[in-house]
Amino acid sequence: MTDPTSEYESLTIRLSDDGRDVARIERELASFAVETPSWGYGDSGTRFGVFPQPGRPRDVFEKIEDAAEVHRLTGAAPAVAFHFPWDEVEDYGVLRDYLARLGLRVGAINPNLFEDPDYRLGSLTNPDAGIRSKAVDHLLACVEIALALGGDAQSLWLADGTNYAGQDDLRARRRRLEDGLGRLYERLPEGHELLVEYKLFEPAFYATDIADWGSAVLLCQRLGPRARVLVDLGHHAQGVNVEQIVALLAHEERLGGFHFNNRKYADDDLIVGSVNPLELFLILCELVNADRDLPRLTIDQSHNIEPKVQAMVLSVLNLQEAYAKALLVDRDALAAAHGAGDVLAGHEILLDAYNTDVRPLCAAVRTRKGAAADPVAELRASGYSERIAAARSGSGAAAISGGSPR
Ligand code: RM4
Ligand code: MN
Ligand code: MN
């Protein structure tokens, strides 16, 4: 067996010899944090079927327990993003206390304007003013939930769109959308932000009302400085250069955050970095390059056949590693290559960082934080999956740790 300590030592010695500030890289890596989504722990499927998994959470408290396990193992997932009404509870004080008891905090609040039968022709863009008001009321209720949970962000993906040319007036829909979001924005508490997510298609198949980053950024510009764009990695056409979108949004100070996942075809919501790890690395390079605090980072996945906690752990690890590689990029050398107009020198510098095996570095940083050197192995050895499968099999209100909050 290889000795992890010596792997760490030879890596850090080589990096220091190459002029990298290893202490700084480790500090940045240690503070890396991503929100995990409550909806990523529950059952999900495709329109063809759902495969229930043993140990699946029966309520939002059990989702929080799974999120706490992911954080315990990785040390990098301290916040949970929620989705309403999916995560509705009677008393948000209880939910807030439960998060704190498990060492977590609230992430972004995601309003849901896509399931109510009233929204068949749209929510904020619906031709019916009564339905539009109902949608705005839900957005405002989500602001109250954020306040009750101690959160400070609304993260909205709008499913609105049309299926056929001529179905509705595209410009009228845009005006209704601006009006509805304007009503939310004017009630956004100080210090809160509004993230506007775009998606090319699905469920609408002809014209989605916020289909791309351009439509999203135009809305944000109308709303105000606390409205920023959220980039979901599965929401573009094939071949789109996502890292360039990230660079442009950062330049415009409109980069609000991310929904990390990976896809091969459409909005596949697969494990982060599982299909296109190079793209993930290049996106993180843009974030490092922006020279400011990282924006809100969230995982948005839906695991249909894979064990959910393990899939989430792997996603966090892949993100940590991509971030570590982005931190390794020799930015002075890169700038010099750009200045010299050398076509391939900069490319080589990026590949050198990308091809570095940063796993020993990430493991060392995790261990120092009290997380696991090898989180997947530790998860498998811990018996967590078996415990939740047993505890959550009945219809009772069992909690895995910390007792029942209910
Ligand atoms: C959408 C979008 C949203 C997510 C829902 C569940 O495709 O990515 O962010 O909240 O799925
Ligand atoms: Mn998303
Ligand atoms: Mn999506």
Image: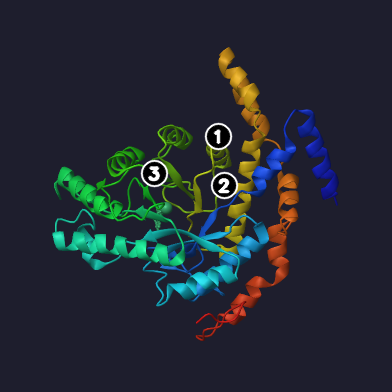
388 shown above or below 180: below
Q: What is the residue that sits farthest to the top in this orientation?
A: 340
| Beta carbon of the mark 3 residue lies under 8 A of ligand 2 | no
How far is mark 1 from mark 3, CA to CA?
18 Å
Quarter occupied by residue 78:
bottom right
Q: Mark 3 belongs to which amino acid?
A: Val
Q: Where residue 105 sits in the image (x, y, percent)? A: 53, 62
Q: Mark 1 belongs to which amino acid?
A: Asp
Which residue is at 41% across, 63% downward? Answer: 147
Q: Is residue 9 left or right of residue 117?
A: right
Q: Where residue 231 sits in the image (x, y, percent)? A: 43, 45
**Residue 237 visible:** yes
Q: Which residue is mark 3?
A: 229
Instruction: Please give the label number shown on residue 88.
Output: none
How far is mark 1 from mark 2, CA to CA?
23 Å
Quick one: SS at disc 2? loop
354 shown above or below 298: above
Total numbered badges shown on the rendered structure: 3
Which residue is at 43% across, 35% downward? Answer: 245
Task: Say whether disc 1 or disc 3 marks the residue closer to the N-terminus.
Answer: 3
Q: Which residue is mark 2?
A: 273
**Near-viewer residue (132 or 322):** 132
Q: Is residue 115 left or right of residue 287?
A: left
53 shown above or below 75: below
Closer to viewer: mark 1 or mark 2: 1
How far is mark 3 from mark 2, CA to CA?
21 Å
Quick one: SS at disc 1? loop
Quick one: SS at disc 3? strand
Q: Where residue 157 sits in the image (x, y, percent)? A: 35, 53
